[in-house]
Image (cartoon, coloured by chain):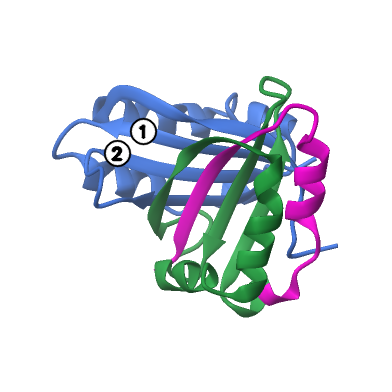
Chain colours: A blue, B green
Amino acid sequence: MTFASAGTLGVVPGRRGELLAHLTRRSDVLGQIGCLAYEVGVSDDDPDTVFVVELWESSDAHQASLTLPEVQASIAAAQPLLSGDFGGFRFNVVGSPLRD
Amino acid sequence: MTFASAGTLGVVPGRRGELLAHLTRRSDVLGQIGCLAYEVGVSDDDPDTVFVVELWESSDAHQASLTLPEVQASIAAAQPLLSGDFGGFRFNVVGSPLRD
C-alpha cells in the first residue's frame, strides 16, 4: 500500500537555500528503494520553512530507507540547517480519482 | 511551477468510508485541468480524518479547478460528511531529488 508523508521542516533563518539545495540534490538511490515522489518546496507565507511531500511504495520501504548509510548521512548533513520545528502528517493511500 | 497541497479533512464519525469513496471516484476531468497527483488516504492514529496530497501543474491550475461546476458539485456533495476541521499546508515545488 502506498505510503505518504507530508512534512514541514523549520529552517535556521537565512539557510533555507542551503536546505533546498541539499534536499533536491539528485539521488538515484531513492528511486531504487521505493520512493515514488519526493517534492520539495517553499511558501511565501512562511519563509523559514521547507515543505516536503513524499510518496513511497510502502510504509516498510520508507522505514527501511532511514537505515541506509546514504540517507543517514544526508539527515546528519541537514541537521545544522534545521531549527527543530517539525510538522506534518503521514498516511496510507487508499486511492486516487486519477486512476482506477 | 508545480503546486502542492497537503490537507487533512475532519470527518463526521462513522462516515469516513463514504468520504473516501467520494474523493477517490474516478475523474478524468482532473487530469485534463492540470492535476498531476491526488492521493487520498487514512491513518490508524486518526480514524476521523481523511488525508489528501495533491500536485498541480501550477497554483493557477488549482485555483481554476475550484471554479469548475464538476468540482463545485463534488465539494458540495462532500459537505455533509465533513466535521469542519481542516488542516495542512500548500507550497510551490522547487525540485525533487528524483529528477534533474
> Does residue A12 appear left or right of residue B74 in this picture?
left
Q: Residues within 10 Å of mark 2 (few under 14, many from 20)?
A: many
Where does label 1 land, which residue?
A9
Look at 74% across and 37% down and name the residue there. Answer: A58
Residue B78 is one of the magenta-drawn residues? no
Q: Position of residue A6 (x, y in %)?
A: 52, 39
The span picked out in magenta is B1-29
- Looking at the picture, tell me which residue is in the foreground, B1 or B77: B77
Pick whichever of labels 1 and 2 is earlier in the sequence: 1
- Are marks 1 and 2 in one subunit? yes
Q: Position of residue A45 (x, y in %)?
A: 25, 47
| Relative height, residue A100 to residue A88 (above, below) | below
Check the image and name the residue furthest to the bottom: B32
Residue B15 is one of the magenta-drawn residues? yes
- Looking at the picture, tell me which residue is in the foreground, B53 or A33: B53
* Subunit ID for the residue under disc 1: A
> Does residue A24 appear left or right of residue B73 in this picture?
left
Look at 74% across and 75% down and name the residue there. Answer: B28
Name which residue type carries label 1: Leu
**Residue B33: in sight, yes or no?**
yes
| Relative height, residue A50 to residue A76 (above, below) | below
| Relative height, residue A37 to residue A50 (above, below) | below
Name which residue type carries label 2: Thr
Q: Label 2: state its secondary structure.
A: strand
Q: Position of residue B53 (x, y in %)?
A: 58, 49
Look at 23% across and 43% down and name the residue there. Answer: A16
* Image marks 1 and 2: residues in contact by CB distance under 8 Å: yes
Where does label 2 land, which residue?
A49
> Does residue A19 appear left or right of residue B5 in this picture?
left
